[in-house]
Amino acid sequence: MKHNLIEIVIADDHTIVRQGLRKLLEEEDDLKITGEAMNGREAVQKVQELKPDIIIMDIAMPVLNGIEAARQIKQSFLKTKIIILSMHDHTRYIRELLSIGVSGYLLKNAVSDDIIQAIKAAVKGETFLSPSISSRLIEDYVGMNQKTSQDELYNTLTNREREVFQMMVEGYSTKKISEMLCLSPSTIKSHR
């Protein structure tokens, strides 16, 4: 933390969500919003540029989803804590993000106090989960669900292959992907 302020970046592809979070968080004396991002790639760039204490991030973002952005942030910027704020409560997402090392997972229907608590917990090195997420994880643990072969295959992909995969799913052409990632079309074909 710099100057006793907790510096935060907000990453969500919906402007109104970013604006609402900013307004909510700026009411707290010890929180400072230092940046915003509209997609996962921009979120990674903002963390690299601003080195915030916390990034609050959605999962479903264009160009680079929140899961892959979280993975890249945790690999390169260990001090930045990640809090996921999403409408998705799929156990697979939750498990994957917790294994990456996120500090919190909240659903977008969370109350404002939960978001503040998640930030304070993250700063202390603790993990904060929405109550419904905790319940789901307990059910999953008790059920001991087996990984599917699709999950295992997906986990063998490199970060770059996952980026290319997401962009393909979003309908981008090989040429457009190569331009966006500053790589040759043949490299993109290789990743495909």
Image: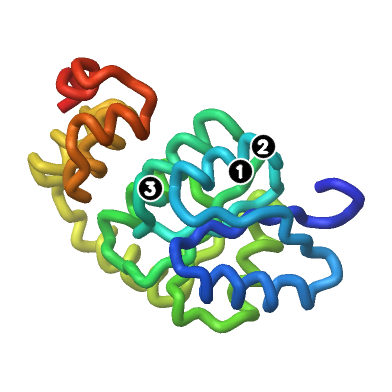
Q: Residue at x 52, y 38 (%)?
A: 73
Q: Secondary structure at mark 3?
A: helix
Query: Which mark identifies residue 49?
Result: 2
Quick check: 95 left or right of 86? left
Rounded to the nearest whole Å, what is the CA distance between mark 2 and mark 3? Answer: 20 Å
Q: Are marks 2 and 1 in contact (CB under 8 Å)?
A: yes
Q: Name the residue at the left extreme.
A: 149
As shown in the figure, which amino acid type bears the numbered disc 1? Lys
Q: Name the residue at the right extreme.
A: 3
Q: Which residue is mark 3?
A: 67
Quick check: 170 left or right of 93? left
Q: Are marks 1 and 3 in contact (CB under 8 Å)?
A: no
Q: Are marks 2 and 3 in contact (CB under 8 Å)?
A: no
Label 2 crowd bin: few (<14), some (14–19), many (20+), radius 10 Å: few
Q: Secondary structure at mark 1?
A: helix
> Which image quadrant for residue 20?
bottom right
Q: Residue 191 versus residue 149: which sits nearer the camera? A: 191
> Which image quadrant for residue 37?
bottom right
Q: Residue at x 69, y 56 (%)?
A: 8
Rounded to the nearest whole Å, what is the CA distance between mark 2 and mark 1? Answer: 5 Å
As shown in the figure, which amino acid type bears the numbered disc 3? Ile
Q: Which residue is mark 1?
A: 46
